[in-house]
Image: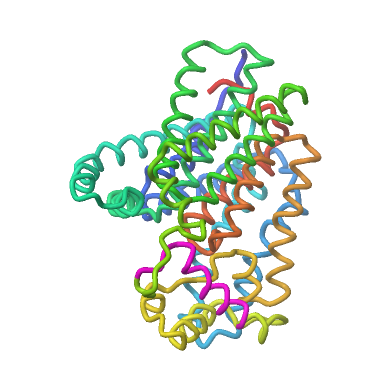
Amino acid sequence: MHRTERSPWSLALWISTVALASMPLLGMRPMVFVIIVWLILALFVRMRSANPTMVDRTALIVLSVPFLLIVLDLLRADSIASGWPFVERSAALVVFPIGFLLLGAPTDARTRSWFTTVFTLSGTVLALVVNALMLPYLSEAWEIDAPFSSTYRYELADISGVHPPYAAYWFLVGALFQLDVLLGAFNKWRPLRSLLWRTASVIILVVTALFIGSRMPLFAFGAGVVVLLFMRLPRAVAVRLSVLAMFLLGAAVLLSPGIRERMVEVLPFGNTTAQHIAMNSIEIRGPITDCSLALLEENWIVGVGAAEVQRSLDVCYGSLGLDHMVASGYGPHDQALHWWLSYGILGLAAFALLFGWCIRRAWQRKDALHLSFLLFMLLCSFTEDLLTRQWGVVLFACFNTFFVAGSTTEGSETNA
């Protein structure tokens, strides 16, 4: 296939764009550096180009609204210093729309294929390295009969520096990307080696996510798989494969020690404790919900401001004698609720607009991968402050904006 010649600067921009997808292997500072270089190159290439850029103003506004709300919230913070960390962490919500939509960074079919492939490979390498380095610790835990789930999650965070649920997001999003390619093979021939390495990556990523044991990401992954099946295949085939996929995922839950231990906590007899200090991941949701709803009841219209949410929750935890929760700084663990508490009704509206508009756009374009990604992130945002933590917001803003700025689903059918 003939490829248009790229100028050196355009090639540098393309490379930096693809490099954004290596976020699972990059630490916080290297990722910020890559984003800055990418944005500068996008601006430089745009200034040198004689061709006018068609800017999707509606998309640019919708994707940037949450960030604008966060900036406006600075006006009622006690000081700029107290509110600035929230602006800084959320900057990805406006940086990626500027780069992809305003400056026209590449989002064509070939780039999309490379973008998703590099992300999957980065996640696979991270999973392999983490699992290899973790073997001695798991062996020690086995000898003293320590719980697999807590040991694995602690060591994963220690080795990678990533909060376990966010690592699970990376791994399962990477798996969704390659499942989309594999399903596309029903309609388009692919080399056997391509199918084999993609299948191997999916297995490695899903197994690692099962070991991590975060429940909602796995449930969201199952939902994302169903979306891909029904949008990619004939309905009768999709129904059969959906049943098979749910059976395999259920069997994996029973066989994997990580997710099995965490699922037991959901049951009434699962690891209930009398002491607050030993609360499991389900028991701890009670005080979080009670304190969050109590705060919302008094501030549901205008919110308390992003800088005050955690402080107010900590006061509530302290009044319940949950000092360990105060020390750990547990947030609402629900992104819509977090924005509602922070910015009032406008925060909830911004959340609904962001996901609602993007889902509608993906559905109109019949973009199976984008829709699957959005459903995955939406479900995960119900159990985590996903767009408040930097790794969560960078993952969402980067890929969501990339998909919105792209033209069609054809990119997921292109060989990398």
Could you say which is closer to the camera, residue 4 or residue 136?
136
What number of labels is visible? 0
Using the image, determine if residue 332 lies above or below residue 124: below
Q: Position of residue 22 (x, y in %)?
A: 43, 40
Q: Is residue 61 visible?
A: no
- Residue ID at (40%, 79%): 326
Most extreme residue toward the front is 269
Model colouring: rainbow
Q: Is residue 287 visible?
A: yes
Could you say which is closer to the camera, residue 171 or residue 29?
171
- Residue ID at (57%, 56%): 95
Tell whether position 135 is magenta. no
Q: Quadrant of residue 185?
A: top right
- Residue ID at (77%, 45%): 361
Tell whether position 280 is magenta. yes
108 on left or right of 170: right
Q: Position of residue 168 (x, y in %)?
A: 46, 46
348 on left or right of 32: right
- Residue ID at (42%, 36%): 255
Q: Position of residue 74 (x, y in %)?
A: 58, 79
**Range of the magenta residues?**
278-294
Q: Position of residue 352 (x, y in %)?
A: 73, 61
Q: Quadrant of residue 134?
A: top left
198 on left or right of 411: left
- Could you tell me what secondary structure mostly forms the magenta stretch? helix
Quarter of the picture containing the N terminus is top right
Could you say which is closer to the camera, residue 283 or residue 351?
283
Could you say which is closer to the camera, residue 355 or residue 401?
355
